[in-house]
Amino acid sequence: MTLSAIEIIGYRSIRKIRFPVRQLTVLVGGNGVGKTNLYRSLELLQAAARGTLADEIAREGGLASIFWAGGKNLSPDGSFDPMYRTDGYRKGEGHSLRLAASFADLGDGSFDPTYRLEVGFPTKTDAAFPNEAQIKAESLGWQQRGKTVSLMERKGGTAWARDAAGLREVANDDMLASETALAALSGRSEIALVRDSWLPGGSFMASVPMPNPPCAGHRGR
């Protein structure tokens, strides 16, 4: 069972990227190009599986610290560009973080699901701190014969899943905004396969990226 692809939208220096992942994937690049942000995005997906996503985001300084920051740049000559709002973010781009992970050959080798997650600010009516991470949406889908079968879907505090007969049912209608359905509904077999692949003993393991060592200078004659 393997992680096959990752998609990241709106995380720190990453506006949008989707990249394939193999059993061994090495990220190479100069200091400051964003390798750590790719790695941290994987850690956030792992935290979603553990049920500790809100805590991880809080440790990073809250939602305002993790959203894509590139929109705060104006035009190359420093003048105001109308594609940006007055707060520096691009028009039409909301303040949210979206992550997705695709898997291949889970279970008996024929299960290739994709898990998606969206995190955003609480609404004015939510009983939460202004900068507290809120799970806006989650889904677990499986492509079969060109169509996506929804195995789990979560919007707000309600999550749906499939029962033993494959029928859609409400699995939980009182979820906390800070908890993930991926962790809370892990008693269901398909969801458990995806969750467990992120945990120790599963298919995912990451090593902290190391900074490039400084190059020693030459002294010539």
Image (cartoon, rainbow, N blue to C red):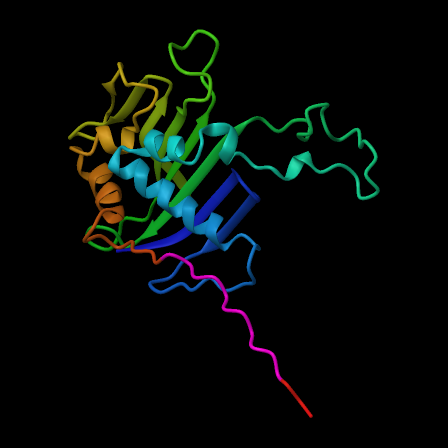
Q: Is 211 colored magenta in this rendering?
A: yes
Q: For the N terminus, which image quadrant?
A: bottom left
> Residue at the spot x=47%, y=45% of the render?
7
Nearer to me, 116 or 202: 202
Q: Which residue reaches farthest top?
A: 125
Q: Is residue 76 above or below residue 25?
A: above
> Left or right: where does residue 4 sit relative to residue 211?
left
**Residue 160 locus on image (x, y percent):** 29, 23
Q: Is 52 colored magenta in this rendering?
A: no
Q: Is residue 181 above or below residue 123?
A: below
> Residue at the spot x=17%, y=29% of the render?
165
Q: Which residue reaches farthest bottom?
A: 221
Residue 45 found in image quarter = top left
Nearer to me, 197 or 212: 212
The range drawn in magenta is 208-218
* Magenta stretch, overall SS: loop
